[in-house]
Structures are given as C-alpha cells and as structure tokens.
Image: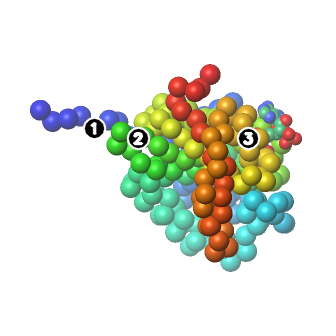
Amino acid sequence: MRRKTPPRPKFLIKTDRLTLRPLRRPDYKVWREAYLEVKKNKNKYDRTLRKRSDLTERKFLKLLQRQSLARRLDQRVEFAIFRNDTGQFIGMVYLFVFVRAIFKHGMLGYSLFSSQWGKGLALEASKAVLDFAFDQFDLHRIVAIIDKDNKRSNSLARRLGMTREGRWRGAVQEKGRWVDHQVWVMLSEDRS
Ligand SMILES: CC(C)(COP(=O)(O)OP(=O)(O)OC[C@H]1O[C@@H](n2cnc3c(N)ncnc32)[C@H](O)[C@@H]1OP(=O)(O)O)[C@@H](O)C(=O)NCCC(=O)NCCS
C-alpha cells in the first residue's frame, strides 16, 4: 500500500494585528518603501539599513527565488510580517529546519524595522510562528541563538516562554570570527 504524504502546510498565519506569509511579487512596492524609510540602524543587531542599489526589483525577484527554493528544499520558511491595519511590511520571522528524522529540531529568528519596536508585535509574530512550527510543520524542539548583549532579543525569547539552556560555543560567524551565543529552547510540550 502506498504511504500517504502529509498535506503541505499553508504558509499563511493570521493574528489579531498581523498577517505572516512568504513575500510575493506584488509586495515589491511595500517591501521597498519599508527599507527606504530606514535612515540608520538602531543598534548593532539591527541590519535593516540598505543601499538603494540593493532595493531594485531584480534583486527582490532573486530574493523571492532563494526563499521559494529554501521552502521547497525544506530548509527554511521566511515569513514576511504585514500589519493588518495599514498593510505595511514590518519585518521577518525565520523558521529554519535543522534536522527532521526522529529529532524534529528547528531554529527561530526575527527582525523588525525599528519603527515597529516596543509594541509587542515581534512577540505576537514569533508566538504565531512557534505555534505553526509545532502544530503544522512537524517540529518538536526550536532554538533561538542570541548574543548575550542583545537585550531586546533575549527579553523576547524569555517572554515567548523559551528556556535558556546555556551557551553554544562558536555558534555564529561574525566579521570572520566565530562567536558564542546563548541558546534558548522551546519544546512543543512547553507551551502554556
Ligand atoms: C529583537 C526584536 C525583534 C524585538 O522587538 P521588540 O519590539 O523589542 O519586541 P516585542 O514585540 O516583544 O515588544 C516588546 C516591547 O513592547 C511592549 N509592548 C507594548 N504592547 C505590547 C503587547 N501588546 N504585548 C507585549 N509587549 C508589548 C513591551 O512592554 C516591550 O516594551 P520595551 O521594549 O519598552 O520593554 C527587535 O529588537 C529587532 O528586530 N532587533 C534587531 C534584529 C535582532 O536583534 N534580531 C534577533 C537576533 S538573535
């Protein structure tokens, strides 16, 4: 008998204030507008400042291709976050697949435009993506790897209900150097 393949998840999440989904061709204008509004990065973790030459339609379409391939290869899903009230593009939540098999491990990442910080929007978006990861994407253990000095990100991980498990040595390469990061973890059964 042929085994049934599980249904492909819909990469569409709605919350009270937000809609999360992969970027699409018609998003080019709002995507570009959002980056053009950034005048400087707010801290060293904020990487939203872009050169105008990085905001061409050609580069946007290349980005869509890379994101679509990564989804098809089951490597990662990149959710663009849109505000329901204004339709603005306000940031991204990333869900990486580390390993499936018997492990089902993934990783969460996030970045919002600084004009949207301090409103609980990153919390709302990330919580919804964690629920998606456990309930629709068949993952069981999600980590967030965070620089110890990144106050906002560490505080978000705590508010999401993640548990700090310690330090990963040489977790991330930054400017050619491997640096340690804190590791925060959530299991599907940890959710309240
Ligand atoms: C990390 C990041 C996404 C956090 O964004 P954020 O806006 O601080 O996070 P939240 O959405 O949880 O908002 C928390 C703030 O909103 C406030 N808030 C307002 N309304 C709220 C609500 N309804 N629910 C929860 N918090 C609310 C909280 O009190 C808190 O305020 P404070 O920052 O003055 O203490 C953002 O700082 C960012 O994009 N940084 C750059 C990229 C980055 O560091 N990524 C992570 C790499 S590991």
**For residue 108, side relative to residue 136 (left or right):** right
- Report the image quarter containing ligand 1: top right
**For residue 185, side relative to residue 98 (left or right):** right
The quarter of the picture where residue 100 lies is: top left
Type of the residue with mark 3: Leu
Depth check: give the residue in front, 65 or 158: 158
Q: Residue at x 46, y 49 (%)?
A: 97
Residue to which mark 2 is pinned: 103
Asked if residue 29 can be seen in this view, the reply is no
Type of the residue with mark 1: Thr
Name above or below for residue 132 compared with residue 64: above
Specify the label residue 129 is tagged with.
Answer: none
Type of the residue with mark 2: Phe
Name above or below for residue 149 compared with residue 66: above
Specify the label residue 5 is tagged with.
Answer: 1
Query: Do the residues bearing badges 3 and 2 touch, measured as CB atoms within 8 Å?
Result: no
Say which of marks 3 and 1 sits in front: 3
Residue to which mark 3 is pinned: 156
Counting residues from the N terminus, which is met first, the one under dot 3 or under dot 1? Answer: 1
Q: Residue at x 82, y 60 (%)?
A: 43
Which quadrant would the C terminus be assigned to in this image? top right
Counting residues from the N terminus, which is met first, the one under dot 1 or under dot 2? Answer: 1
Which quadrant would the N terminus be assigned to in this image? top left
The picture places residue 181, in percent across and down from the top left corner, at 66, 54
Asked if residue 6 can be seen in this view, the reply is yes
